[in-house]
Image (tube, rainbow, N blue to C red):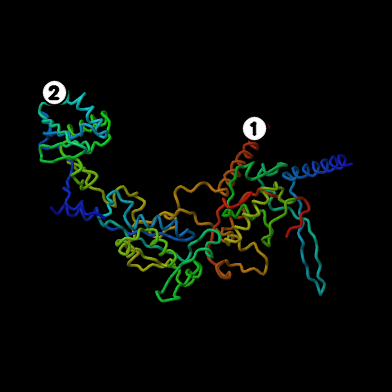
Amino acid sequence: MASLLKVATSTLRSTLWQTRSVATTTPQLIKEIQEKQENNVRTYEGVNIESERSEKLLKSACQTTFCPECTLGLDIKHTDVLILSQYVRSDGCMLPRRITGLCYRQQKKMGTLVTMAQKAGLMPNLGPSWSKKDPKQRYGWKKFNKYFLESTIKY
Amino acid sequence: MSIAKRVQQWATFARTWHIYDCTWQNPFESAALVKTHLMGLHKPIYHPMNDCGDHVVLINTKEIALPGDEWIKRVYFHHTGYPGGASWTLAWQLHEKDPTMVMKKAVYNSMHGNLQRRHTMQRLHLFSGDSVPDEILQNVTNQIRTPRTVPQRLDHIDKETLENFPTIMDYPKDYILR
Amino acid sequence: MSNSHLFLKSGFPRAPLQNGLGRYVCQLQRITLKFCKNNGSSKGMRDFIENHLVDFAKENPGIVVYVKPRRHRTPVLVGEYLNGDREWLSCRNSTQEEITKWVDLLRTQNGSSSSLRLRKMWHTDVPSIQGPWTPFLLRSPEAHGQEYPSVEASKPLDAPQTATEKLIELFRQQKQLGDEDVLSQKRAE
């Protein structure tokens, strides 16, 4: 039974990945929730839109197993906010592993790097709506500049 | 000594002025760098008994950066001399009171405690912001390069770079954008 | 802290009267070897006297050699020089070979080396024709007339390539490759 399940999941996954690799030529459709207000009626609608990222996607990132460190040899630091912001939701939350497609170790590392960048105040525009956007307005010692050493990341 | 030789002597021992931007720099890494220029250790004519130190102007000392949680781990000790006069101040509290003090102490403590140290410190000019009096700025002929690159904030990066930056992660199909 | 250096002669190392330019005059005038006849610490010195001293005296007729036995004292080498210097050396427990080397040193040096404090670690009789160093020497032409503080002059020179820069570079290469693919397709048509 277990082997059957495994076969089923593997075929499912392979078909999924195929669709994903196809997506590099035809853009990926993702959904955006849009809010409309018409005469005391508020409607929420999930609209299919094209992913902005599909055009700027790196070819090697379409592989089934992709890792920025192993595949591209990128030594990502917490100051590389342009890379780290791709793994982050608009409220500053790290995306889960099923969406980022990273291995366990890299997912943990990327999460730590995102935390570091947020604490250093390098991604102040990616945060919850109630957050103070300016890192200089933080409370106590947190308002001063700080940096982190990547060598302190465990695992 | 002939006039030509005297002028040569003035040129060799001329005091030059350096400027150093402390923005996002570790004060203790910077202190080692500033110290060499203050004491004249970077000159080939250096000798502990000749007076060949330079002036260094430190700007933006308010913007220094410490690694990790060192702002709450580093403690500055002071004793008034009276019983019970000891006080311990955290680095961030000291920095809040006087934004030049952490940097000044870092440079002071990086040098050996000899009689020359007080005189060497007289050649250090600290400014918490980037506004420097014009008579000081006129003297400056060199800028010391910093050991760390200044990180760029995501909301300060210009729009063109943001839009053209390549992505290495695309959302899966039917991902609900948030 | 000792103040023994206060009365030390100071100067620069130099050859007396340009010794060796025309003919060489050995500066060592007298050498005294003091030793004990029975003590073990003088073993090397006794061996030296037995095996090498006569040869040494024959080879250097200009040097007066004194040998002074004394009971229960450390073996000592004393050299006296033409400029009046006197060099005293303890040879306690030294072997025969070591003493040979010390004697050779005493023979070849100009005066007592330990009684001169060098004013500077460097010295030149021929000063540079470019003149001494100044802070304005070898400055880059860009530094002239530059406004300080400047962001460019503050950046580190040896910063390694960041991941961001590397990614942009990779993407640019990919774009170029893609363009070439399109071109080759057109050529094929």
For label 1, count other residues whose C-alpha is less than 10 Å away and answer few (under 14), some (14-19) or many (20+): few
Frontmost of labels 1 and 2 is: 2
Residue at point 49%, 71% (across, down): B96
Q: Nearer the viewer, residue C49 or B111?
A: C49
User: Where residue C118 sits in the image (x, y, percent)?
Assistant: 21, 46
Please identify the quadrant where the N terminus of chain C is shown: bottom left
User: Where residue A59 sits in the image (x, y, percent)?
Assistant: 67, 42
Work out whether mark 1 precedes mark 2 in sequence or the reverse, and give the earlier one: 2
Residue at point 85%, 39% (across, down): A7
User: Where residue A4 sits in the image (x, y, percent)?
Assistant: 88, 40
Relative horizontal placement of residue A97, taking residue C175 as reference (left or right): right
Please identify the quarter of the rendering in which residue B86 is found.
Answer: bottom left
Element class at badge 1 = helix
Residues at marks 1 and 2, common chain? yes
C17 over B87 or under it: above or below: above
Q: Which residue is mark 1?
A: C187
Please identify the quadrant where the C terminus of chain C is shown: top right
C50 over C68 or under it: above or below: above
Q: Nearer the viewer, residue C82 or C140?
A: C82
Residue C66: mark: none
Residue at point 58%, 62% (across, down): A121
Element class at badge 2 = helix
* Subunit bearing disc 2: C
B145 over C99 or under it: above or below: below
Say which amino acid is labelled 1.
Arg
User: Where residue A78 sits in the image (x, y, percent)?
Assistant: 58, 54
Residue C58: mark: 2
Say which amino acid is labelled 2.
Lys
